[in-house]
Image (cartoon, rainbow, N blue to C red):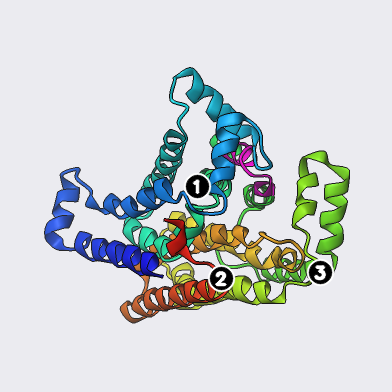
Amino acid sequence: MVTYFFASAMIAGLYLLTTKVHIVRFRERGVDFRWLMLVPFVILLLFSANNPDYQVYKESFETGYGPYYETGIRIIADILGKLRLNDYRVFLLLVASLVYFVFRLWNRKIENIGMVVLLYSLFIMYYDVIQIRFTIAMMFVLLSLYYTIDKKWAPAFLFAAASVFFHRLAALPCLILFYLFVIRPRKDYSLSGKEAKLLIVVGLLGSVFSRKAVELIAGRSAFFSRITLYITNNVGYDSLVIWVGYEVFLIAAIYWLGLKAVIQDPEVDDGTKAVSINLFRFMLFGITVSGFMLYVEEFNRMYRLFYLAGYLLFAYIEKFMKGTDRLLLFWAIIVVSILFMMVAMLRGINFDLYW
């Protein structure tokens, strides 16, 4: 708990500092201090040697064997080996560089990217420095999402394909990206009631049939056979309530406090509305795939991706929101995120032991 509060306080302090007028002026000269907010992430990533996955990933990277050795890691390890840079810390620095690159790219659309980094650091970051494979896959999915929204199919496909090479669970958000690429939003960029209802109905059906679907896919495809290791013996109602509950909170709060007004505002340009509604549609799939939470352990990691998309959406539209609504949403997300971490730690996750 000490690690969590110390890192969070440091990042919050940096966020407040980088919003000062005299600091913002440096940004106009090409010196952007906001990226210092990612320094705690890099430190935690490099020195989390005591977490459950560190030795497994390190051994897989160095030997080419292990239960979590994915093709993407093998390719990177081979390249680094030929360059005589086959130290595992070098690999972790590449992961940190990827995270920085993703936020930097989204900064082209989102002026207040510091807000995203702050919200990301309140709890997603602590999972990302441990579950390295999915962190890499998640970042590639976010790159693909960026280009999917821009209707650039080549980089969108490239990054989506790359994500699957690092974690097989990434195949699911890749299907979501394909849906967003093919099924475009309504011409007025409003939320389609039929689409929303369909996604919710699929989520309800998933609570009944998702276990059979997982077993069928795992049994028919060798590529997904490992997923059988994560099928639960007991129905995970608690995980469903916690992880999907936070997703529903984000969806409802962002829509009613900001997105709906932005979509209906005639002074907001179509490009802004298109980005906003597509990010929101991506978030809605957090409800659609919720049925998997009941039967597949570790599926909750998917929700970190949906939450981060929500933070990107909030930071993207916050300049169009009313001052009171913006502050209410900002502090509501902060409070709920901290409470989420308190619940995680009460359920046995002790981040102090990892560093």
Left or right, residue 189 beside residue 193:
left
Marks 3 and 1, how far apart at CA: 30 Å
Please report the bounds of the magenta region as a residue range: 158-171
Amino acid at the residue labelled 2: Gly
Q: Label 1: how many residues lie within 10 Å, few (<14), some (14-19) or many (20+)?
A: many
The label on residue 146 is 1
Amino acid at the residue labelled 1: Tyr
Disc 2: which residue: 348
- Residue 196: image location, x then y, percent: 67, 69
Confirm whether residue 145 shows in the render: no
Closest to the observer: 297 or 302?
297
Q: Which quadrant of the structure image shows residue 12? A: bottom left
Disc 1 is placed on an element classified as helix
Closest to the observer: 47 or 315?
47
Closest to the observer: 255 or 76?
76
Disc 3: which residue: 205
Marks 1 and 2, how far apart at CA: 35 Å
Q: Earlier in the sequence, mark 2 or mark 3?
A: 3
